[in-house]
Image: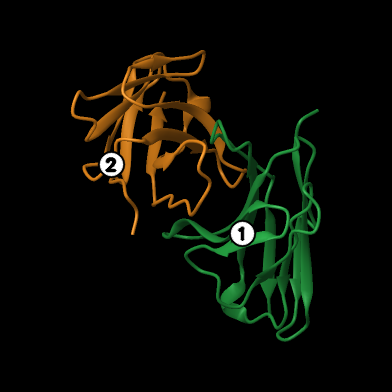
Amino acid sequence: DAKTTQPPSMDCAEGRAANLPCNHSTISGNEYVYWYRQIHSQGPQYIIHGLKNNETNEMASLIITEDRKSSTLILPHATLRDTAVYYCIVRVRGRDDKIIFGKGTRLHILP
Amino acid sequence: EAQVTQNPRYLITVTGKKLTVTCSQNMNHEYMSWYRQDPGLGLRQIYYSMNVEVTDKGDVPEGYKVSRKEKRNFPLILESPSPNQTSLYFCASSFGDTGTQYFGPGTRLLVL
């Protein structure tokens, strides 16, 4: 079973911020939160990851709650090209083992 | 250019005819993995490898084999394909310390 829970789908208006939630209530202290997205049937693309501090890069921001049981991926100004399935996973960085993706959130950007 | 390549990209075959899907990465990554993706089921891990000669089962290993004789290559072998292995397959690799996975473009397999 996936270690994360995400809503199956979400809508967001073009130009607005898209906020995608993820629950990971059983996360361990050494597990990182990673976000990927998949556009159509292309290979998933890495977006961002974090441990406990909020993170930002050129694609998105990641907000992790203080208790680390949930996080939010923020796409600040969504465009039609951000329409994709977004996956949140947890894994221990530096220790490579089984990875469980789950079904992700299908984000629809509305014109 | 850093990349993960898969071949073939599309394959139609018949039940029982052995096939191999190749995966190669040019980033000197230690970790490599195979996933399958089916409608409504998301990405499911088949096998993974932490380094040369080290492989382990993911969530759905039945009917598949892998090998890791070289660091850059991680072929997926279907000894006797069946229609329920019709799927979209992705190979991925990552460097151990970062955990960030790079995915290949996918192989769409149809088993008749």
The residue at the point 75 percent across, 71 percent down is B12
Report which residue position mark 2 lands on.
Answer: A27
Answer whether residue A3 is visible to the viewer in this image: yes
Q: Colour of chain B?
A: green
The residue drawn where x is 43% and y is 60% is: B41
**Residue B111 % position (x, y):** 68, 76
**Colour of chain A in the rendered structure image:** orange
Nearer the observer, A45 or A39: A45
* Label 1 neighbour load within 10 Å: few <14, some 14-19, many 20+: many
Residue B27 is situated, as x and y percent measured from the top left of the image, at 75, 34
Which numbered disc, 1 or 2, marks the residue closer to the eye?
2
Left or right placement of residue B42 versus residue B100 in this view: left
Quarter of the image with the C terminus of chain B is: bottom right
Image location (x, y in percent) of residue B57:
54, 66
Report helix, strand or loop for mark 2: loop
Q: A30 or B63: nearer the eye?
A: A30
Task: Inspect the image, locate mark 2, and give the three-letter code of the amino acid beneath it.
Answer: Ile
- For the residues bearing labels 1 and 2, Cβ distance under 8 angstroms: no
- Residue B85 x/y as whole percent: 60, 73
Residue type of the residue flagged with mark 1? Leu
**How crowded is the residue under tag 2: few (<14 C-alpha within 10 Å), some, or many (20+)?**
some
Is B23 rendered above or below residue B112?
above
- Residue under label 1: B88
**Residue at (53%, 26%) from the top-left corner?**
A81
